[in-house]
Amino acid sequence: MIVALAQGQRIEASAAQRGPKFTCPNCKAPVILKKGRVRTHHFAHKPPTACTWAVGETAAHMKAKNALCEAFRQSGRQAEVEVEVLSTSGDRRADVVVWSRDGKTRVAFEIQHQPLSFEGIEQRTRGYIAANVPVLWMGLLSAKVIDGADLKGGNLVIERYSPRQWEKWAHAFAFKNIWFMDDQGCLWRGVLTSHQIEVPYSSWYNSDGSEESAGGYKRFSKRWRTLTLSGPFQIADLMIKLKDRDPWENKEFKLPKSKVVTLTTKTKA
Ligand SMILES: [Zn+2]
C-alpha cells in the first residue's frame, strides 16, 4: 500500500516522515510506514488483518504502480496512485489515475500481476465504466520473458506464450493491444496472434499391406499464442486517447460497450 491517511488526508509513503499516526484508507486501522533502501516505500498493516487491501500485493506490483504514476507526473500529467473510484457497479481502487489536461476527466490504469478470470476482469471493468472512468489493463513483463524472446524485424517475438484469461480479455477489449511494463519501468505494446503447430506427415502399412497416412498439416494451438512486443516506450513519448467500442462476445467471454483507453506514440513533427 503506497497511500495512507494522516489526519484524514492522503499521503504517499515516499513523502511521509515517521511520527504521525497513519491509517489505512479502507479499514481505518493503523498502518506502519516502511521506508527501506530496496523496496518501494510503502505502508503495511499490523498483523493480523482482514483488510482486503492488505492481501495479495507483491513488491513488483507496488514498484510498478509507483513507477507508472511517477512517469506520468514527470511527463507533466496530473496523476495519483491508489485512488478509490466509487461506482454503482462495485467500488474499485485504481492503481494509477491520470487526469485529462483540462482536469475534467480521468482514466484509470490497472497493473494486473495475478491471475484473473474472464468474469473477474469484466466485472471490474464494468465498475470503471459505471463510474465513467475508462480503464487500461496492463501486465508486467519479467526479464525472463524478454530474455526468451526472439528479435524479429525490430520487435521481440515470443513464439509460444500462454496468455492468462485476463490477458486474452484485455487484448480483445483494447482492440488487439495489450500493454506491459518491464522491470525497468519501460512500456511494451503486445499483440497476440494465433500460434500454429505443425503436425508432421507420417505413413505406415497395416498388417494387410494397405497404406495409411496422417499429418502433414498445421493446426492452431488452443493453449499457445504468439506474443509480438514493440518497444520499449517511455510514458513521455505516449499519448492517451479514448476510443469507443461496441459490446462483443465470443464463446469464452463478453466485452461491454465502453470507452477504451489507448496509448499511441507521438508522431514527430
Ligand atoms: Zn486496511
Image (cartoon, helix red, strand yellow):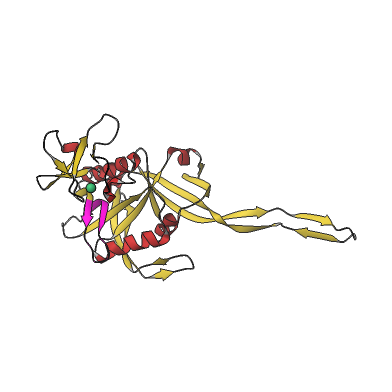
| Residue 174, picture quadrant | bottom left
Q: Is residue 249 left or right of residue 4?
A: right
User: Which residue is depicted at the point 31% across and 52% down?
Assistant: 110
Front position in the image: 115 or 189: 115
Q: Is residue 189 left or right of residue 12?
A: right
Q: Taking the image as drawn, is residue 31 in sight?
A: yes
User: Which residue is depicted at the point 47% across and 49% down?
Assistant: 228
Residue at the extreme top: 37
Front position in the image: 81 or 190: 81
Residue at the extreme right: 208
Q: Quadrant of the N terminus?
A: top left
Front position in the image: 164 or 182: 164
Return the x and y of residue 152 as percentages of the image width and height.
Answer: 51, 45
Q: Taking the image as drawn, is residue 269 in sight?
A: no
Q: Is residue 183 magenta?
A: no
| Magenta part of the chain | 83-98
Magenta part mainly helix, strand or loop? Answer: strand
Return the x and y of residue 99 as percentages of the image width and height.
Answer: 20, 54
User: Which residue is depicted at the point 22% across and 42% down?
Assistant: 74
Residue 224 vertical placement versus 145 (above, below): below
Return the x and y of residue 3 as percentages of the image width and height.
Answer: 20, 44
